[in-house]
Amino acid sequence: MVAHIHVLGGGLAGLSAATRMATQSRRVTLYEAARALGGRARSYYDSQLGSRIDNGNHLILSGNQAVMAYLERIGSKTSLYVSGKPQFPFYDLGTHKQWTLLLSKGRFPFWLFSSSQRIPGVRLKEYATFLKLLRADHTVTVAECLREGNLAHLLLTPLAISALNTPLDKASAQLFASILRQSVIAGGGHCLPLFPQEGLSETFVEPAINFLKFMGAEVREATRVTGCEIAENRIVSLFFSSGERVLVEKNDYVVSTLPPWVAREVFSPHVAGFTAPDEYESILNVHYRLPQELSLCGVLAESRFCGVSGGMVEWIFIRNGIISITVSAANRYINLSQSEVEEKIWGEVKTVLGKGFRLSLPDTPPFARLVWEKRATFAATPHQDTKRPSAKTSLSNLVLAGDWTDTGLPSTIEGAIRSGMRAAEACSV
């Protein structure tokens, strides 16, 4: 009998696991509690903006191997816009200077010796910070590794906060080092920025759904799991909010890609030593609809985004008449009112794009859509990192996945997709 794989959760971890196992002649059913798949990496039409937007901004790099393998599998790699250069424009709100990091194509960092490519004003000894981060043990925070200077202020701080979504005095240096190893340290060939030409759903979600249906898999939306029945150290049935009970046969597997707080509720009574992160950080995204598209030029036209240091804003993305702003580790701003957030962010956007890139923006902020994801990621602290479980559990047919499991990375698209691939491998053993 062909094994039936029950995948709980239709975010990128679930889609990764389901599409991988659908290629292995497995019977696959994917269950998603919401009415749309994709989790935190999806797109939707905002009627007030009059445009389709992503619910969050994600910077994908050419060195994200799990992402590339996933998109190849579902046939959507060509939907990505690929920047021709490993370049990252920045603007510092403290000095009001714009600069661009242009990495060398190979692994050797020739960019360090070019004043037009490197970070301005960095002393040679500051680069020892990279060694300190790469050698840090599991107890060390990012802040403990940073030296005072422009390397930390202009590059590593905005990069680390966005990658880890955690204040740097609490963030794990080991997790940040894992990001550096597959990006800056690996060389410019691994750092070409990639963006969906249309949206996250059009690149990551809809092609996966079509692929699953083509492979004969069943996709069930608005189907929320609420519990399970255990016998002989394995799951024998799943219960859903509709009252439905689904039997899990002897050779079947259950792959849970549920958020950690849901997985804990459903499985911790049955899984010996169940652990999961239990502290979370928020992400704030603000989308502005412009009356007309901006006429981009130079490095901004090539990159379509820029990083920001010295302010509340960390990244600015520009696409299809929409300016999208990302603020990571946003718990620190939770007490600000919506009007305060909008006023502060628009002021920074006007400064960055106006003074830094000579774009003309209205003084009055256009209509904005604030998307505040309260539990966007687990807090990437050394302590929380120790709570991340491996794929296999004490139950013989339950496998865990999700960017909060032990992927070796912080909560990223690459980590989510990698976890789904590992879950598929665990079901094959």
Image (cartoon, rainbow, N blue to C red):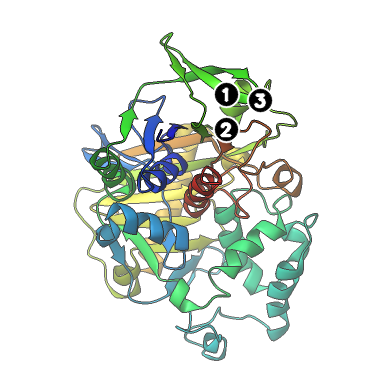
Toward which corner of the image does residue 73 lie, by quadrant? bottom left
Tell me the SS state at disc 3: loop
Residue found at the far front of this picture: 1
Report if the CB atoms under discs 2 and 3 are less than 8 Å apart.
no
Image location (x, y in percent) of residue 207: 27, 46
Q: Residue at x 43, y 43 (%)?
A: 12
- Which residue type does callout 3 highlight? Asn
The first of marks 2 and 3 along the sequence is 3
User: Left of 293 or right of it: where is 136?
Assistant: right
Marks 1 and 2 sit apart, C-alpha to C-alpha, by: 7 Å
Image location (x, y in percent) of residue 281: 60, 40
User: Left of 23 or right of it: where is 313?
Assistant: right
- Which residue type does callout 2 highlight? Asn
Find disc 3 in the rendering and name its residue. Answer: 233
Image location (x, y in percent) of residue 272: 73, 29
Find disc 1 in the rendering and name its residue. Answer: 235
Find disc 2 in the rendering and name its residue. Answer: 397
Q: Residue at x 42, y 60 (%)?
A: 60
Report if the CB atoms under discs 1 and 2 are less than 8 Å apart.
yes
Closer to the camera in the image, 182 or 283: 182
